[in-house]
Amino acid sequence: MDSTAGAPKGALSHVRICDFTGQLAGAGATRLLAAFGADVIRVEDPSNHGAWDILRGMPPYVDDRTGPEFGGGFNNHNVEKRGITLNLRTERGRELLRELVAVSDVVTENFAAGVFERLGFAYESLRAIRPDIIYVSNCGFGHSGPYREFKTWGPIVQAVCGLTFSSGLAGQPPAGWGYSYMDHGGGYFMGVAVLMALLHRARSGKGQWVDMSCTEAGATLLGPSVLDATVNDRPLRRPGMPDSNRENSPEMAPHGIYPSEGEDNWVAIACRSDADWQRLRELLDEDWARESRFDSLAGRIEHQDALDAALADWTRPRERFEIQRQLQARGVPAAAVQRPQERIDADPDTAHMRLWPEVTHREMGRVRVDGLPVRLSRTDWKLERGGPCLGEHNQEVLCGLLGVAESELPELREAGVI
């Protein structure tokens, strides 16, 4: 009997996913679906100790234990999933996978283009097993086009698609959007793709192959820059273009991040209008703030360097949360720049949203993971079970779901199938 029977039902509890995704671009997608109840069965190769997903052995760790069961990133991205091992270089391993596909709604993977096909499971092969199967593949450049053979990684995707060039200070090299930003974006697109394919099948009875490219997903975030270049023939980084700490669409001044009391403490301030500036000016009560050159937005833009320098002198000796309170009380948008640990542990709104729930991992015990920033009144998400250890659910899935005799499991282990 399948051990998931009788478990609390989520919105996607009727969906089973045979999951080969790794890292974050893929695993992040199936993580979302698992949180809403989908039975996500993570398939890994038993012969390489989790090397299909390098996050298994990467920090952060909860203590001094290391190895494929203790990677914090892997646990975070694979919560609520079941995990099995199958060696697809063996005929019995391929046979068991065919049986799993036959009872699954979706097959997901984010290998490089062609890898899953070489393992013997191209889309047509999957359709032969289950005609209405949904197959979702997510790689750097998709499975067609001149770049299909190239392999990539999060920061490379960002460089190729144009995101890296879009962020940086004036006169400095492009700063980019942070490590593997598009792994997150690609995962979100993949999660949506699975849901749309499931909706289509519910209406038509037909499955399909969803071919995704993380690079193209990143390019969709460049709409205004592409429009400006194609319509106005203006490049993104050009002389006179404001740096990433200022805004010109619409123009605002002051509008930036300013130093505050203490080591590496900052506060964000935005004056959307002359009325905002007047309210800030009253709080400042400084001679420089009353200068006529700052009366209008045009004057503040023209003298923005001087304005920012003077405002920074005012904020520097003051406590950032006190600045936030004073400006918000006057209706001026302002917020202390918070460190992640401050947001996680001290902010009452974050606690209310349950953004960092604790799950139980077989080896690590109780550990904190990312929650989901949404609340559904009827079918809310649930994260309680940590990511699977290697082969943790072999017996549960192979015997309880596929009907393999428990007496066969030692033979499968001896043969290197699981």
Image: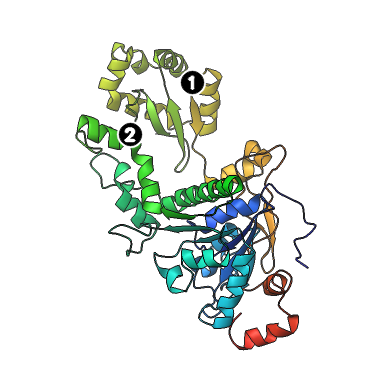
| Quarter of the image where one finds residue 349 | top right
**Rendering coords of residue 371 (x, y %):** 62, 48
Of residues 418 and 398, the one nearer the viewer is 398
Identify residue type, mark 2: Pro
| Quarter of the image where one finds residue 329 | top right
Query: Which residue is under mark 2?
Result: 224
Q: Residue at x 52, y 17 (%)?
A: 330
Of residues 72 and 27, the one nearer the viewer is 27
- Residue 332 visible in this rendered orientation of the protein: yes
Secondary structure category for the residue under label 1: loop
| Of the image marks 1 and 2, the number of the one nearer the N terminus | 2
Q: Residue at x 70, y 84 (%)?
A: 408
Mark 1 is surrounded, within 10 Å at the Cα level, by few (under 14), some (14 to 19) or many (20 or more) other residues, namely many
Real-space Cα distance between discs 1 and 2?
27 Å
**Colour treatment of the image:** rainbow
**Is residue 335 shown left or right of residue 101?**
left
Quarter holding the C terminus is bottom right
Of residues 353 and 106, the one nearer the viewer is 106
Identify residue type, mark 1: Val
**Rendering coords of residue 268 (x, y %):** 45, 31
Is residue 131 placed above or below 389 in the rendered structure?
above
Query: Which residue is under mark 1?
Result: 332
Q: Residue at x 24, y 38 (%)?
A: 237
Q: Residue at x 33, y 12 (%)?
A: 295
Secondary structure category for the residue under label 2: helix
**Rendering coords of residue 287 (x, y %):** 36, 15
Quarter holding the N terminus is bottom right
**Is residue 200 shown left or right of residue 34?**
left
